[in-house]
Image (cartoon, grey):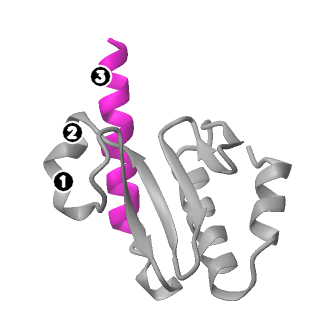
Amino acid sequence: MKSKEVDQYIEKFDGEKKAILKSLRTIILKTFPELKEEMKMGVPWYGGFFYLVALKKRVNMGFTFGGLLKKHEKELEGSGKYMRHVKIHSLKEIDEKKIVRLMKLTNKTYEECKR
């Protein structure tokens, strides 16, 4: 479910960044409509698994890093122990199939940990 606070965060940006944020948000909520969307640490978070942040020249989409996602480490950037990200500079760079696949790997890892 969409959060008013996330709406406000996205509306602060213009042009390409705003379009990227809207597109990624749509992909996340379409793939996992049950995830809670909320603002944490000043940026949109989704179920504690994914985040979006608009930076000076790009948007990062972050993923909880661990389990099955570690096998796909080369597709992610960063060196964080618990979070990794993809950098998106333009709408053309959004690879929905890749993003959905990485999200599902993250979610599958979480589901296996709950057992």
- Residue at (56, 65) in percent of width and height: 24
* Numbered range of the magenta stretch: 97-115
Q: Which mark is residue 11?
A: none
Q: Position of residue 50 (x, y in %)?
A: 49, 47
Amino acid at pointer 1: His
What residue is disc 3 on? 112
- Residue at (45, 54) in percent of width and height: 62
Q: Residues within 10 Å of mark 1 (few under 14, many from 20)?
A: few
- Residue at (48, 65) in percent of width and height: 60
Task: Please identify, in this view, whether the residue under mark 3 or under mark 1 is nearer the observer.
Answer: 1
* Label 3 residue SS: helix
Q: CA distance from mark 3 to mark 2?
A: 10 Å
Q: Position of residue 43 (x, y in %)?
A: 66, 52
What residue is disc 2 on? 68
Amino acid at pointer 3: Glu
Of callouts 3 and 1, the N-terminal one: 1
What residue is disc 1 on? 72
Of callouts 3 and 2, the N-terminal one: 2
Q: Dividing the picture into quarters, in which one does residue 53 lie?
A: bottom right
Q: Position of residue 7 (x, y in %)?
A: 81, 59
Q: Residues within 10 Å of mark 3 (few under 14, many from 20)?
A: few
Amino acid at pointer 2: Leu
Q: Dividing the picture into quarters, in which one does residue 23 lie?
A: bottom right
Q: Is residue 103 above or below residue 22?
A: above
- Residue at (60, 45) in percent of width and height: 45
Q: Are marks 3 and 1 in contact (CB under 8 Å)?
A: no
Q: CA distance from mark 1 to mark 2?
A: 8 Å
Q: Is residue 2 left or right of residue 47?
A: right
Q: Is residue 27 above or below residue 32?
A: below
